Amino acid sequence: MIYRITVVVAGLVGLYIAVIGVAYLAGYRVYKIPTSAMRPTIEKDESVVGRLSDSYRDHVRRFDLVIYLAPQATGQLYTKRIIGLPGERIVIDASGVTIDGTKLSLPSSVSPRGFAIKGCDLVIPPDTFFVLGDFTENAADSRYLGPVPKQDVIGYLVFKK
């Protein structure tokens, strides 16, 4: 009887390790978000699952939650929301966000209160994305650091843990 239990437990442990290994090889990783910049979508110190994918860079869509390398903090990974795409003119002010003259309807999780603190008006350069933290009052995003180069986007968030 003990032998059967041991074999079943060993089999389950082996299956668990195999599933984790396959997920890891497919690019899935668990990240702990160190800031409150994406609150309420992602709370400070919350764990999320992301997928690393070089090919994703060519399929980025507005409002995606991306993982990128921040050039100002070597080796640090950041997560923000894609708001602007290459070639678009983005204007952010107290009234909201406009893209190419059209007011953007933002997800409800994006706080507009920070727009009055720091706005912007720029044409997003080729091969870059404009990212915004959901907690705009306290987010080091493209309003402060500029657009994120396409090559620095390394993946996207899949779901919260």
Image (spheres, rainbow, N blue to C red):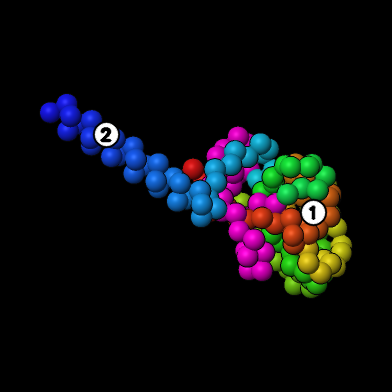
User: For the image shown, how many numbered marks are present on the structure?
Assistant: 2
Q: Residue at x 68, y 38 (%)?
A: 35
Task: From the viewer's perspective, tell me whether residue 110 is left or right of residue 100.
Answer: left
Tell me the residue that label 2 is attached to.
Answer: 9
Q: Say few, some or many: other residues with alpha carbon within 10 Å of mark 2 (under 14 / 14 to 19 / 20 or more).
A: few
Q: Residue furthest top?
A: 2
* Residue sitting nearer the eye, 105 or 82: 82
Report x, y in % for residue 117: 83, 47
Residue 61 in view here: no
- Distance of label 2 from label 1 (alpha carbons): 49 Å
Q: Residue at x 55, y 39 (%)?
A: 47
Tell me the residue that label 1 is attached to.
Answer: 142
Q: Residue furthest left?
A: 1
Q: Residue at x 87, y 62 (%)?
A: 121
* Residue sitting nearer the eye, 159 or 100: 159
Q: Residue at x 56, y 50 (%)?
A: 50
Rendered image: mark on residue 75: none
Which of the 4 quarters of the picture holds residue 94? Answer: bottom right
SS category of the residue bearing label 1: helix
Would you place residue 12 above or below residue 53 in this image? Answer: above
State the extent of the magenta-drawn residues as a range.
39-68
Which of the 4 quarters of the picture holds residue 107? Answer: bottom right
**Between tags 2 and 1, which lies in front?**
2
Would you place residue 36 above or below residue 151 in this image? Answer: above
Report x, y in % for residue 134: 67, 49
Task: From the viewer's perspective, tell me whether residue 26 is left or right of residue 83.
Answer: left
Which of the 4 quarters of the picture holds residue 100? Answer: bottom right
The amino acid at mark 1 is: Ser
Q: Earlier in the sequence, mark 2 or mark 1?
A: 2
Report x, y in % for residue 136: 73, 47
